[in-house]
Image (cartoon, grey):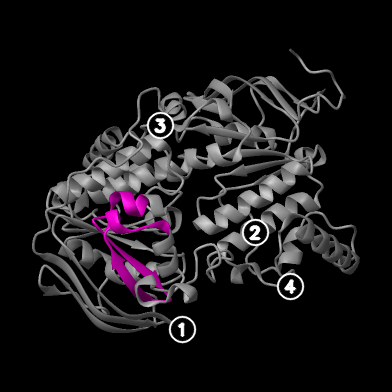
Amino acid sequence: MASTPGTDTAPAIELRGISKAFGPVQANKGIDLVVPRGTIHGIIGENGAGKSTLMSILYGFYRPDAGEILIGGKPTAITDSQTAIRSGIGMVFQHFKLVQNFTVLENVILGAEDGGLLRPSLSRARGELKRLASEYELQVDPDALVEELSVGHQQRVEILKALYRQADILILDEPTGVLTPAEADHLFRILRGLRDEGKTIILITHKLREIMEITDNVSVMRRGEMVASVKTRETNPTQLAELMVGRKVLLRVDKAPAQPGAPILSVRGLRMVDTAGVERLRGIDLDIHAGEILGIAGVSGNGQTQLLEILGGYPEKGARLEGTVTLNGQPLPLTGSDARARRQAGVGHVPEDRQVEGLIMDFAAWENVAFGYHDAPEFQNGLLMDNAAIRADAAGKMQRFDVRPPNPELAAKNFSGGNQQKIVVAREVERNPDLLLIGQPTRGVDIGAIEFIHKRIVELRDAGKAVLLVSVELDEITALSDRIAVMFDGRIMGERLPDQATVADLGCLMAGVDPATTAPEDAITPATAPGLDEGVR
């Protein structure tokens, strides 16, 4: 039934027949969506299903080719983001839109100043931020520089920006993709508080656990179409996964027990002091054998990134390094080497940040697929690179990894985040490295692609290769790993076997407490562990 314009019972948002095409690609096809006011509404779908496009239309980034938008029952032409903001819509993007060297306060008022004089705007904003922070558990130092904040606190700034602009409808795109489990739990408390105050939340996520935990209703998109809208309490993860991908999905990692062989990687006494004098790694010792996945768990910012960068051949310039690293019994230099030399030695690397370290966003997919391997013999034609061979190789990889759209000529920036990840994983995994370094392999990736990426990682292990896996997703660590090492403050706090590890045990190790050597009355639980709730930068 259509809503009655201008009534309190009208839905917060109603979309009718929304369509949007980008050239031959039909991103949205006649989308109908009703979001009741005062609810948390989940939107799920595979990468490239059209979720972000639909929300970008609602926020005024794109104009639909056809269809109608109603806000509170009133037809509303949203021509740009300013129109959306005036209509009470705020959006928190997956990649934050903050000025890093501005303070929290300056970011919040940017674009919403009261006039030509900045001081009155800052004064008013400071008082309003204090009220919002207290009311919605969004505490953050208004005078802190954004670049000095943890990812979780930066996200709070984005939410504060929207609330400061009096948003009644808040759209969050993959909000937990860069958060620890504890930060995600805190975010959910905030969202529940906003809903209870009458705000309407739209949550775009790939994580079915989050959908079941936090939403009231959920809509499923597939290949640009809306295929289902249901009450969350009337569905389940298995049904939602099947609706998302159009087939049955295995919601667990299917793998045989590991058959470890000879050591592939050995690290002894690895230390790193960065250019600011901060000791990031404090004597790391670890071994990974052929046919084994070693998972590194820990709150982001405890040395995992530096470990991957050193092993990948590009440590921070000017950092002081000590220790030894050997691959297949041969020493790998800590300095004077580079990522190219590491690849030649048999190291593949899927970095944690695909957009900064894994891809050149303005370059075509076929160029990105060749990066790091462009001097391979099969890509050479005399003194020149054989671009036709590179294009054909990229097309094959994109087909095998189900990259959508499967067009090697498209720039990397024109793919969704999950499809960007598939490009990077395809490039590294298909080179059959002796050691695969893989950081946050499924961040921002949909359930079908997660299943596929996990399968390829396990296949590499079963082929006798060694895998070093870094992830903030404990479910992913425990499901994929044959052994789990937990890092805290640049140290390995302890090792566990997945079938013997509990969330409480791993959470204590992540907080710097080893339950095996700590009396029960002295132990720190994951819920109260320092750094777990607030995030560690």
Q: What residue type is labelled 1?
A: Val
Residue 433 horizontal side relative to residue 92, left or right:
left
| Disc 2 residue crowd, few under 14, some 14–19, many 20+, Cα 10 Å | many
**Callout 2–callout 4 Cβ contact below 8 Å:** no
Which residue is disc 2 drawn over? 98
Asked which secondary structure carries label 1, the reply is loop
Residue plotted at (57% across, 53% down)? 185
Residue 304: % across, % down: 38, 68
Asked which secondary structure carries label 4, the reply is loop
What is the CA distance from the residue labelled 4 to the residue labelled 1? 24 Å
**Residue 456 among magenta residues:** no
3 vs 1, front mark? 1
What is the CA distance from the residue labelled 3 to the residue labelled 1? 44 Å
Residue 8: % across, % down: 85, 27
Is residue 349 among what the camera can see? Answer: no
For residue 453, what is the image quadrant? top left
Q: What stretch is highlighted in magenta?
A: 476-503
**Residue 500 among magenta residues:** yes
Q: Indicate which disc residue 405 carries.
A: 3
Residue 496 horizontal side relative to residue 151, left or right:
left
Residue 240: % across, % down: 47, 28
Which residue is disc 4 drawn over? 143
Q: In this view, does 136 lie above or below 304?
A: above
